[in-house]
Image (spheres, rainbow, N blue to C red):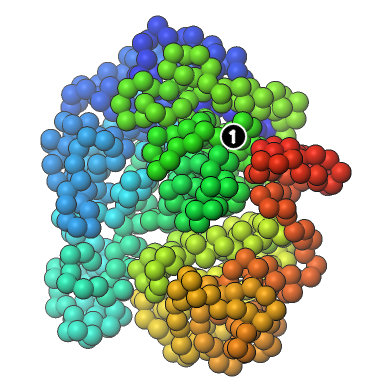
């Protein structure tokens, strides 16, 4: 498939006289896509019920006339002041019970039915007006669900919605749920927490000490379902008026809702990739690592999300926003090294992105993002990234095709497990995302390409290795499917550790088919007290004591089993390993994998009959007889 470039543009930020020249420059650069509209509600509907579409008609017309294809965003991430004045209780409430005020963006609670109606109205108007416009080639719903921690809201609307949702989870006679079933499933006999009625159930915040983890986890599941419903309301309206594909732009390391569930209603998954900002503000990496990659980004973070969103989009995915230079929002905001914008773009293509769109066309001299670079400076001169985008364009003109092939390794990602770990990390800093990402990095350090699979996957054909770490609730049919997989499977730690309502099942986990393996005790470990493994590597953070099972593949220096067989091709890993423990286990279990130990900061990805190599370091490196330049890319025939 041919890969394309695009840009995010805000016509409402610039005088109308400038649009035609902007459009001509975009077309000249070779861009295909322009995303517009996603924050412009106040310009579309200045006063309730009074629409002003003239400017947007002309903007779309101008861009279309230049040969560009518009991605039209619905503006529901930025309800104007008049919407909030009409529905003051639509504002989200934080975990401390404070109302989050108007004056920036994403100031809405997903559960507020009045706000949902306002969204339906504006989206209906847009879809009717632009649904058949030939220049509108795709849609984006809202903008970055969950950005600024906006999925969990502790509002009155959320409380009412949560009670109804729970009634649906524990159905009883008539419209009322079965409260006894909820009490039993959650173990509410503990601390006399049994409820008499669903209307007694509160939100899991502001309690004296921790709430029942079953309660907290249920609230996260409910909140995720609210995002799915909110998105679906828009999708249903757009589809009634338009045949153009619909996307949403997801984020990096945001796990507060089930992206696979939202993605099931959409045609394209996309995400917003800010490698330097993410390294600084959410990678969880050591200071040394952040210093080493401050101007390049983490060598695996982007790739992980590319693979994740390829799965969420069922093969169709984009980068909707690509960092072009320094951003404004991280603790430190360095400039990317020369070459990195090109490298990030090619890395996305190598992982199968259909399009990469830069954020944004021109740096805005006003408001919150005035310190955020664009392809152009505020004075319209070219910024550094413009040249790199032009370089990619020239390369695409020569060789636009990139194929996607099945990877040898599959790694499952389960948003529900992430929520479970967030509710009960058991040790400071432990997270499901962190565990899965560590496995991903170990694979990449071995030069392996990885496919990410949703928790609903049951077909593992073609994979030499399937990794399912940390999936706290594992349905029986998944165990059966994994047990029958033709490749090697690694599960654990904490896989199958809880039932569907957050209780420890008996027989004790993992209760693997045909195995007597049992986790008899668990401990979390201080970061400065790693447990050494015999033969190299460590367990860090989390370690289980296990009984039973078959052959021991890894054991601790003091002789305790850490990785054991629990099926002919299934291995249980009873701890959170470091890179070298994970790499050792992979190499020992699957000797047929074509591994190659990557030089520090170098990664590769197979795409059809070529291998892409990426150099995140500041030194040139020799690869297969060729020079892989610092901050550079190499495309090598396989
Ligand atoms: C994204 C967001 C954009 C812009 C950008 C700045 O999270 O979708 O609207 O704020 O960050 O880096």
- Residue 632: x and y in percent read 69, 37
Q: Where 216 sits versus 302, above or below? A: below
Q: Residue at x 40, y 43 (%)?
A: 331
Which corner quadrant holds the N terminus?
top right
- Residue 170: x and y in percent read 28, 73
Q: Under tag 1, what secondary structure?
A: loop
Q: Residue at x 46, y 87 (%)?
A: 521
- Rate crowding at label 1 as few (under 14), some (14 to 19) or many (20 or more) other CA atoms within 10 Å: some
Residue on which the image places disc 1: 337
Task: Judge by depth and name the residue closer to the eye, 210 or 192.
Answer: 210
Residue 257 makes an appearance in the image: yes
Q: How many marks?
A: 1
Task: Judge by depth and name the residue closer to the eye, 428 or 359.
Answer: 428
Q: Mark 1 near ligand 1 (CB under 8 Å)?
A: no
Q: Which residue extends farthest right?
A: 625
Q: Residue at x 80, y 67 (%)?
A: 592
Task: Judge by depth and name the residue closer to the eye, 117 or 419.
Answer: 419
Task: Judge by depth and name the residue closer to the eye, 397 or 623.
Answer: 623
Ligand 1 shows up in the quarter that is top left
Q: Quadrant of residue 620?
A: top right
- Residue 22: x and y in percent read 48, 13
Q: Residue at x 49, y 19 (%)?
A: 376
Residue 493 makes an appearance in the image: no
Q: Where 105 sits versus 315, above or below? A: above
Q: Quadrant of residue 440?
A: bottom right
Q: Is residue 425 left or right of residue 512?
A: left
Q: Where 633 sits versus 264, above or below? A: above
- Residue 327: x and y in percent read 44, 34
């Amino acid at each position: 498939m041919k890969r394309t470039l695009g840009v995010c543009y805000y016509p409402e930020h610039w005088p109308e006289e400038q649009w035609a020249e902007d459009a001509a420059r975009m077309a000249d650069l070779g861009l295909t896509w322009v995303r517009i509209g996603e924050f412009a509600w106040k310009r579309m509907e200045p006063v309730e019920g009074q629409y002003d579409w003239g400017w947007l008609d002309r903007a779309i017309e101008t861009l279309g006339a230049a040969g560009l294809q518009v991605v039209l965003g619905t503006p529901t991430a930025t309800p104007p002041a008049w919407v909030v004045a009409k529905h003051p209780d639509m504002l989200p409430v934080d975990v401390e019970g404070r109302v989050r005020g108007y004056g920036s963006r994403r100031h809405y609670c997903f559960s507020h039915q009045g706000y949902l109606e306002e969204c339906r109205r504006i989206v209906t108007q847009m879809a009717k007006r632009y649904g058949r416009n030939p220049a509108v080639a795709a849609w984006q719903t809202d903008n970055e669900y969950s950005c600024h921690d906006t999925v969990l809201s502790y509002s009155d609307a959320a409380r009412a919605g949560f009670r109804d949702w729970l009634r649906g989870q524990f159905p009883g006679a008539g419209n009322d749920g079965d409260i006894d079933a909820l009490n039993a499933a959650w173990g509410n006999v503990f601390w006399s927490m049994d409820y008499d009625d669903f209307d007694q159930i509160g939100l899991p915040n502001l309690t004296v000490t921790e709430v029942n983890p079953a309660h907290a986890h249920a609230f996260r599941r409910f909140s995720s379902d609210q995002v799915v419903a909110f998105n679906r309301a828009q999708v249903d309206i757009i589809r009634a008026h338009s045949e153009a594909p619909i996307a949403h732009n997801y984020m990096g390391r945001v796990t507060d809702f089930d992206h696979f569930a939202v993605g099931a209603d959409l045609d394209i998954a996309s995400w917003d990739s800010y490698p330097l900002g993410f390294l600084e503000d959410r990678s969880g990496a050591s200071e040394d690592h952040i210093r080493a990659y401050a101007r390049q980004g983490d060598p695996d973070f982007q790739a992980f999300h590319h693979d994740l969103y390829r799965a969420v989009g069922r093969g169709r995915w984009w980068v909707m926003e690509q960092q072009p230079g320094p951003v404004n929002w991280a603790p430190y905001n360095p400039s990317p090294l020369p070459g990195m914008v090109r490298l990030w773009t090619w890395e996305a293509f190598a992982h199968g992105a259909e399009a990469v769109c830069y954020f944004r066309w021109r740096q805005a001299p006003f408001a919150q993002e005035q310190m955020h670079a664009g392809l152009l400076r505020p004075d319209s001169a070219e910024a550094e990234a413009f040249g790199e985008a032009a370089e990619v364009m020239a390369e695409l003109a020569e060789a636009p095709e990139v194929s996607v092939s099945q990877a040898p390794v599959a790694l499952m990602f389960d948003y529900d497990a992430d929520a479970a770990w967030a509710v009960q990390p058991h040790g400071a800093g432990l997270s499901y995302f962190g565990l899965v990402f560590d496995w991903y990095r170990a694979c990449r350090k071995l030069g392996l390409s990885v496919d990410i699979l949703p928790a609903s996957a049951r077909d593992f054909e073609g994979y030499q290795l399937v990794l399912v770490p940390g999936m706290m609730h594992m349905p029986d049919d998944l165990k059966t499917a994994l047990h029958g997989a033709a490749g090697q499977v690694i599960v654990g730690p904490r896989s199958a550790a809880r039932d569907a309502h957050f209780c420890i099942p008996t027989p004790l986990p993992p209760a693997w088919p045909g195995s007597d393996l049992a986790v008899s005790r668990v401990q979390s470990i201080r970061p400065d007290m790693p447990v050494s493994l015999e033969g190299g590597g460590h367990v860090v953070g989390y370690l289980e004591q296990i009984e039973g099972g078959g052959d021991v593949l890894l054991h601790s220096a003091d002789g305790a089993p850490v990785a054991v067989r629990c099926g002919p091709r299934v291995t249980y890993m009873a701890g959170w390993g470091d890179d070298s423990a994970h790499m050792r286990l992979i190499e020992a279990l699957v000797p047929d994998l074509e591994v190659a130990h990557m030089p520090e900061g170098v990664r590769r990805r197979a795409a059809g009959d070529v291998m892409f190599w990426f150099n995140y370091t500041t030194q040139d490196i020799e690869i297969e007889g060729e020079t892989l330049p610092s901050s550079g890319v190499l495309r090598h025939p396989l």
